[in-house]
Amino acid sequence: MNDSLQVLDQIRLNFSEEGIFILNITLAFIMFGVALGIKIKNFKDVFLEPKLPIIGFVSQFFVLPAITFITVLALSWFISPTMAMGMILVAACPGGNVSNFMTALAKGNAALSVSLTAIATIAAIVFTPLNFDIYGGLYNKFLSNSTNQLLQPLDINPNKMFEAVFILLGIPLVLGMLFNHFFPKTTSKIDKPIRIASIVVFFGIVGVMLSNNFTNFMAYIKFIFLIVLAHNIIALLSGNLFARIWKIRGANRRAITIETGIQNSGLALALLFNPKIFPVELNNGGMAFIAAWWGVWHIISGLAIAGIWSLREPKVKS
């Protein structure tokens, strides 16, 4: 492991209870905004034409976490244990809240993107805790058999994580879809403003978190930047290559690529600062810095890729 990164495993981030509460409310607000764009029709489409959604779902919740686990093992000589666990946690989360917009900008299949967002958000209630429990547990076992050791045992209760994910994702999703169903005219007016506002507020929360820990963040940003950059590239490539393996082309491949490569790091942050899941005495600086920078970087990379793809039409539509 890079000796200078060992310090990250000793950092307990300075984030107040009020800040944690606001972060949770913000995430719920974001997911409510996402749900405003989801209709029952999206779920019907999944059942009528299941092949593409299934491939996208497998890419997001099976392929990406597995490849991330292999990556953190390969990089164990360089990254700190909490950075590795942060990468595993981010990979276990569903797609980001801006993936639908980016897919549309990239001239991908926006309808498929929305359907994937719908099923991924619901599936995350089970698969986010499950994947983190499986791969986090395997990584801890790997560390126990190596010279690298977590400074504190990371024994996370998957039931508590399931409960938190259900509250943060499930409830806002149901409320947003119900609001969309019963108040379609109002939804059409507030959908876009809510999405924009939620992104701005989320960036503000991340900015406050990083500013409160500015010295530590600036000391390690060069390492965090490289790790998140590599992880994001791996996520995008895994989605694209998995779609290629199944001979998915054109607009559909673009949608699956973006859905796999844009992660809901806000959920990762909200889980990290939940004392029922990650005890307050746990030093999780590496995990939090990875998740926070993911929240910034995937917007940049996603817009860049979408901008490039927007310049040319998909060769085929399917």
Image: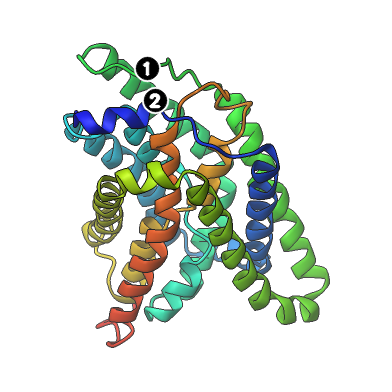
- Is 122 drawn above or below residue 188 in the view shown? above
Lower sequence index among marks 2 and 1: 2
Where is the N terminus found, in terms of image quarters?
Answer: top left
Give the side of residue 141 with respect to residue 294, left or right. left
User: Can you identify the residue that label 1 sits on?
Assistant: 151
Where is the C terminus found, in terms of image quarters?
Answer: bottom left
Label 2, label 1: how many angstroms apart (C-alpha)?
8 Å
Helix, strand or loop for disc 2: helix
Return the x and y of residue 50 as percentages of the image width and height. Answer: 46, 59
Give the label, 2 or 1, closer to the camera. Answer: 2
At label 2, the amino acid type is Gln
Q: Badges 2 and 1: C-beta atoms under 8 Å apart?
A: yes
Is any part of residue 290 visible from this angle?
Answer: no
User: Can you identify the residue that label 2 sits on?
Assistant: 10
At label 1, the amino acid type is Leu
Give the farthest residue toward the top.
145
Give the farthest residue toward the front.
215
- Is 58 drawn above or below residue 88 in the view shown? below
Q: Choose between 90 and 94: the one closer to the eye.
A: 90
Give the farthest residue toward the right.
182
Q: Residue at x 58, y 36 (%)?
A: 273
Q: Residue at x 37, y 55 (%)?
A: 55
Q: Choose between 118 and 36: the one closer to the eye.
A: 36
- Is 153 drawn above or below residue 317 in the view shown? above
Q: Choose between 64 and 315: the one closer to the eye.
A: 64
Label 2 Cα neighbours within 10 Å, binned few <14 / some 14-19 / many ≥20: some
Return the x and y of residue 6 as percentages of the image width and height. Answer: 28, 27
Q: Residue at x 59, y 48 (%)?
A: 122
- Is 199 drawn above or below residue 137 in the view shown? below
Q: Residue at x 58, y 31 (%)?
A: 161
Is any part of residue 70 visible from this angle?
Answer: yes
